[in-house]
Image (cartoon, rainbow, N blue to C red):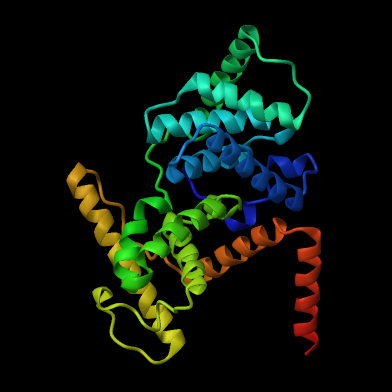
Amino acid sequence: MKLIKKKDIFQNINTEYDISAQVQRKLLNGNAQFIIDLAINLELNSYSTVSLAIHLCNYFFHHKCYLQYDRFIVAAASLLLAQKIKDGDPRMRKLLISFHKIMQSIEQTRMANEALMQSLQNKLCIAESRILKVIEYEFDIKLPNDYIEVICKKCVPKKFEEATFHTLKILILDSYRTYAPLMFHSWVILVGTFLVASSQFSYTPYMSPPPQLNMPPVTNEEEAYKIWLEHVESELRDFEINKLNNTNSKQTEKTTILKQEDLKDFLLAFNEMLFLNQSPEQQQQQLQSQQTQQQS
């Protein structure tokens, strides 16, 4: 799917209907939460499938207006399509039951019966076909999850490898609550969330890279970060080339993907999402802390 330019991310059809950027941020987050709740009800353990479902839903609503479609139906259809793409096991009946169960907790809906289940199934199939048209039937969708093992093996100290692996899966899923995956290459999402994960374990990956990355020692932090990004991108590119060679796929033209400006913008979007999901009390405390820092 085509990446959306930064200037266009909230200048879309929803803006024409006076749905502000702030409201769209909340809707992106809500779409993600609904799909996660569905996945939990389905006992779906694939982070890749859930991430893809959220991505499909949010991509759809960048091109289509929230006021013209039932976003819960679209979200459920996105999960249905993601399961077909990633797992080949849509489990329609269980999805319908889970969908109805969650909707009952959101709004007063009537008890499930065969007629209602058939109606829901028809709506999901129609929504799925609409999503396919919006994504132009593109199924080769790169996800950050596809490269987690590469960055863990090449960039993580051995003692943090397993913990970082699991933390990354959660952080990547959370990143799909934001507009960032609509704008940035999957490698930017991967490395951005990895920088967040490494901070949780109190290590700076570009200042003390493990030997397997083959990066020369650099004392200047700014220069080390620049060189580290080059080495990480090289590792990811080698992995991608090997995968393409194994499938006889065409290699894409080489351009720099891991840009510092993009990573900075990603981390801004990620922090906005964290703030959005805080309680009002936590938000107030953070704002007061920021004001105190600015005054000092």
At a point 34% along the width and 79% down the height, the residue shown is 209
Residue at the far top: name it: 115
Above or below for 126 versus 183: above
At a point 65% along the width and 26% down the height, the residue shown is 101
Res 69 visible: no
Q: Dividing the picture into quarters, in which one does residue 291 lie?
A: bottom right
Residue at the far bottom: name it: 219
Disc tally is 0
Expressed as whole percent of the image width and height from the top left, the position of residue 181 reads 53, 52
Above or below for 288 versus 239: below
Res 161 visible: yes
Camera-nearest residue between 90 and 259 = 90
Expressed as whole percent of the image width and height from the top left, the position of residue 178 reads 61, 53
Q: Is residue 25 left or right of residue 245?
A: right
Q: Is residue 184 left or right of residue 31?
A: left
Expressed as whole percent of the image width and height from the top left, the position of residue 116 reads 65, 12
Above or below for 108 versus 188: above
Camera-nearest residue between 12 and 42 = 42
Q: Quadrant of the C terminus?
A: bottom right
Expressed as whole percent of the image width and height from the top left, the position of residue 120 reads 61, 17
At a point 43% along the width and 57% down the height, the residue shown is 166
At a point 31% along the width and 52% down the height, the residue shown is 252
